[in-house]
Image (spheres, rainbow, N blue to C red):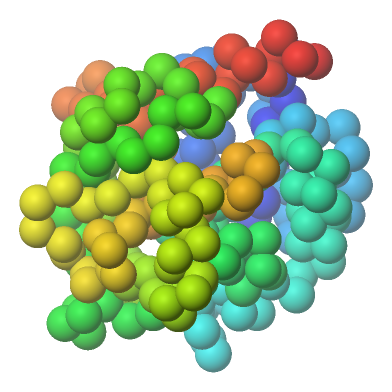
Amino acid sequence: MTKFGVIVFPGSNCDRDVAYVTRDLLGQPTRMVWHQDTDIADLDVIIIPGGFSYGDYLRCGAIARFSPVMQQVIEHAQKGKFVLGICNGFQVLTEAKLLPGALTRNRDLHFICDRVPLKVENTNLLWTQTYSSGEVITLPIAHGEGRFYADRATLSAIEDNGQVVFRYAGENPNGSLRNIAGICNRQGNVLGMMPHPERASDTMLGDSDGLSLFQGLLEKVAAVV
């Protein structure tokens, strides 16, 4: 069994959605981790869900980055364990410097809630091993600050190292540079993405393209632990 931990900040609103996937659909032990809890040593995978942590005051994820649990999340990642940040969670990971770049206001300065096609760029990761290279999947997005930005040198490094995991296919909804929708760290154990795979994991919702991301990771982690 793979032990999942879902971080809960004041303002998180997708934490239960993620837990539904890991606990109810995949049947794995899942613990809701309050942001003041610093004991996560028993967990294999940490997920930072979407929402509006601390009301998105200052910048999205800027306050959550200083929550007590985040130092343990950083150490968890540095040990090579797995961390997934979805939407606001992606923003938190960039604020914590676990991922490069930043998420800024959408190009048109509007909150976007839609379903978008994504191209899977890198299938050499545990997260994406069940997808096909170049496969186009559909996942929901819901964000006001999802425009990925990085300086030229950082963008070049991300591209050269194969850290771009997902790109928006077709129309770019938020103005992200190079259509980037999701990236990983150089080791591949930390993944951040603006689209919501947990909202596309149950066939009852009409879309299960996101479930493969969790399943691919689950197979490998289970084999290791």
Can residue 214 be seen? Answer: no
Q: Which residue lies furthest to the left in this view?
A: 171
Which percent across, then down, holds residue 5? 70, 38
In the visual, does 58 lie left or right of 129?
Answer: right
Q: On the image, which quarter does residue 42 sit in?
A: top right
Count of numbered badges drawn on the protein: 0
Q: Which residue is drawn at 34% across and 39% down?
A: 121
Q: Quadrant of the N terminus?
A: top right
Q: On the image, which quarter does residue 204 sit in?
A: top left
Which percent across, then down, holds residue 86? 47, 51
Q: On the image, which quarter does residue 54 sit in?
A: bottom right
Q: Residue at x 42, y 50 (%)?
A: 164
Q: Residue furthest top?
A: 223
60 in relation to 78, above or below: below
213 in relation to 15, above or below: above
Which percent across, then down, holds residue 156? 44, 65
Q: Residue furthest bottom?
A: 58
143 in relation to 6, above or below: below
In the visual, does 49 lie left or right of 98?
Answer: left
Which percent across, then down, holds residue 35? 74, 60
Q: Residue at x 34, y 45 (%)?
A: 166
149 in relation to 181, above or below: below
Q: Residue at x 69, y 13 (%)?
A: 222
Can residue 60 be seen? Answer: yes
Q: In which quarter of the image is the C terminus?
A: top right
Residue 15 vs residue 174, the one in the foreground: 174
In the visual, does 205 lie left or right of 34?
Answer: left
Residue 60 vs residue 33, the one in the foreground: 60
In the visual, does 42 lie left or right of 30?
Answer: right
